[in-house]
Image: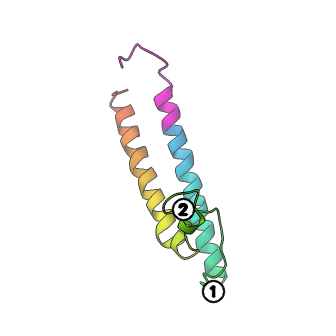
Amino acid sequence: MLKNEGPGYVPHLIAVGLAVLLIWEIHWFIRALLFYKGNGWDFTVDFGPKMYKGDWASPEFEMSPKEKPVSGYPIFILFLSVALACFSVALYEGKF
């Protein structure tokens, strides 16, 4: 798509949306760590929003309480950080 075609604000909205999602994930990751630290690292109690490692419609793919802070949040944070960095660099260089 050429620069003079279509709305030029859409890439900026995508970058803002990625930033909001990243902040939301970091927020829940910190809250989960503080909750489990205060709970004596007892992972029998579930905390935070549901996370799935496969098909979201199937309850058998729901992450356990220990999987969320160990692998769930860090993977989502890494993915969103890389996507936001790539998008921001592309916007800075004028690719969009």
Residue 63 marker: none
On whether residue 5 falls in the magenta region, the answer is yes
Q: Looking at the image, is mark 2 or mark 1 earlier in the sequence? A: 1
Q: In the structure shown, which secondary structural element does the residue marked by tag 2 occupy?
A: loop
Identify which residue, 60 or 34, lies in the foreground.
Answer: 60
Judged left or right of residue 4, residue 43 is right
Task: Give how far across and how far down residue 27 sits, in percent.
Answer: 60, 59
Q: Which residues are magenta?
A: 1-14
Q: Quadrant of the C terminus?
A: top left
On whether residue 13 falls in the magenta region, the answer is yes
Residue 52 marker: 2
Residue at 56% over, 65% down: 29
The chosen color scheme is: rainbow
Task: Give how far across and how far down residue 12 sits, in percent.
Answer: 49, 31
Q: In the structure shown, which secondary structural element does the residue marked by tag 1 occupy?
A: loop
Residue at 44% over, 61% down: 75
Q: Residues within 10 Å of mark 2 (few under 14, many from 20)?
A: some
Q: Which residue is mark 1?
A: 40
Q: What's the residue type where badge 1 is placed?
A: Gly
Q: Is residue 85 above or below residue 32?
A: above
User: Would you identify the image quadrant in which residue 62 lies?
Assistant: bottom right
User: Would you identify the image quadrant in which residue 63 lies?
Assistant: bottom right
Instruction: Name the main secondary structure of what is drawn in magenta.
Output: loop
Identify which residue, 44 or 87, lies in the foreground.
Answer: 44
How far apart in space, not on screen, are marks 2 and 1 (Cα)? Answer: 25 Å
Q: Quadrant of the N terminus?
A: top left
Q: What's the residue type where badge 2 is placed?
A: Tyr
Residue at 61% over, 80% down: 37
User: Would you identify the image quadrant in which residue 90 lies?
Assistant: top left
Residue at 38% over, 17% down: 3
